[in-house]
Image (cartoon, helix red, strand yellow):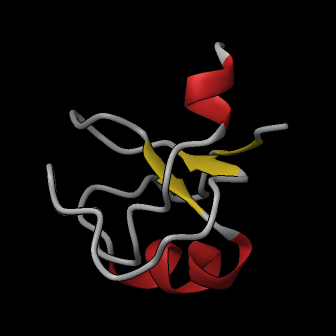
């Protein structure tokens, strides 16, 4: 992972491809999704992403990104 990846912006609770939404917080978590790219979110949007984003696996696969 590069420094640029670490500074990536949160993809918000819905994980719409190419739409980072209004959240400019840095990414801290990566949520695995079925047949989709992993969803990268900030701590504020982790819970909503698990409930609202498409393709989230259950039980969820969550990775901490530092």
**Percent x, y for residue 4?**
57, 26
Quadrant of the drawing holding the N terminus = top right
Q: Quadrant of residue 15?
A: bottom left
**Percent x, y for residue 25?**
60, 69
Q: Is residue 1 above or below residue 42?
A: above
Q: Is residue 12 left or right of residue 61?
A: left
Q: Is residue 25 above or below residue 39?
A: below
Q: How many marks?
A: 0
Name which residue lies at 49% across and 71% down. 24
Q: Is residue 56 left or right of residue 43?
A: left
Q: Quadrant of residue 21?
A: bottom left
Name which residue lies at 29% across and 63% down. 20
Q: Is residue 38 left or right of residue 45?
A: left
Q: Quadrant of residue 35?
A: top left
Name which residue lies at 64% across and 58% down. 26
Name which residue lies at 63% across and 45% down. 61
**Percent x, y for residue 10?**
49, 62
Looking at this view, name the residue that lies furthest to the top. 1
Quadrant of the drawing holding the C terminus = top right
Q: Is residue 22 above or below residue 27?
A: below
Q: Nearer the viewer, residue 39 or 24?
A: 24
Q: Is residue 64 above or below residue 51?
A: above
Q: Is residue 13 left or right of residue 29?
A: left
Q: Nearer the viewer, residue 66 or 53?
A: 66
């Amino acid at each position: 992972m590069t420094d640029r990846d670490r500074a990536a912006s949160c993809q918000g609770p819905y994980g719409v491809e190419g739409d980072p939404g209004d959240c400019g917080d840095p990414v801290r978590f990566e949520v695995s999704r079925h047949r989709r790219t992993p969803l990268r979110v900030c701590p504020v949007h982790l819970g909503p992403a698990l409930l609202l984003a498409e393709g989230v696996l259950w039980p969820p696969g969550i990775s901490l990104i530092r």
